Image (cartoon, rainbow, N blue to C red):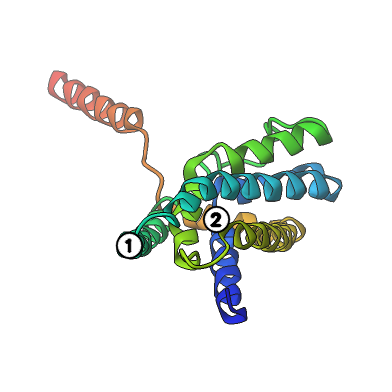
Amino acid sequence: MSGQAWLIFCAACAVVFALPSPLVFSVASYAGIRGRKTVFASVSGGALGIVTAMTISAIPVAGLTYLPQSFMEIVQWAGLGWLMLFLLWTFATPAAQAANADNDNLPGKSSSGIFRDCYAMAALRPRYFAFFLALLPQFVSASGNAIETFATAQAAIMLVALAVLTLQALFFSATLSLVRRMSGNKKIRPKYRTHFISGRAVSAGYRRIAA
């Protein structure tokens, strides 16, 4: 790929990594609750998990290079459509489900536990796998060396992920406030509260009739 293409690739990755997500919330929460001593474990685990997701998604994309160019173009257009849907989905449900409290209920208790938690959150969830499955075909061609392109992409993604996650961990207060602000408008109010209020209204009505 050309230098301009690599800049576009890195910029797209940086935007997606910076969007509020369960991984971003966890990295910032570890730094905010456990202290900045957790930054290395959480950031390295999250970045390595992202690279793992990219590597897994690169396997089917590499197979596409052996298919006709016309089919590759269809996949690229479908990938662009998926990327737009992905961004809309991210803004609709942007953050962690548990972005409510600052109590220490995080699963990682040691540095290795924090590393495993952030790694699993990035590598085992479909978020980054689906993103790279749509993004990589935009930068791979049948005429180029796919293996060399993927190896360079791994290094670029690792550097971008380390930079973005480190900034989010160091500025955890701003990161957490952004996640909570974007999550607050998407929460579904529990039904039992509505039932409780309705029950109290019915009880008050019966008491008024009896009086």
Asked which secondary structure carries label 2, the reply is: loop
Residue under pointer 1: 81
Indicate the amino acid at tag 1: Gly
Residue visible at 83% across and 36% down in the picture: 111
Give the numbered dot on residue 20.
2
User: Residue extending furthest left?
Assistant: 209
Q: Nearer the viewer, mark 1 or mark 2?
A: 1
**Is 164 above or below relative to 33?**
below
**Which sits in the foreground, 47 or 208?**
47
**Percent position (x, y) of residue 9?**
56, 69
User: Residue extending furthest bottom?
Assistant: 4
Indicate the amino acid at tag 2: Pro
Residue 103 relative to residue 178: left or right = right
State the quadrant of the C terminus: top left
- Of mark 1 and mark 2, the one earlier in the sequence is 2
Asked which quadrant contains residue 52, the reply is: top right
Asked which secondary structure carries label 1, the reply is: helix
**Percent position (x, y) of residue 149?**
61, 63
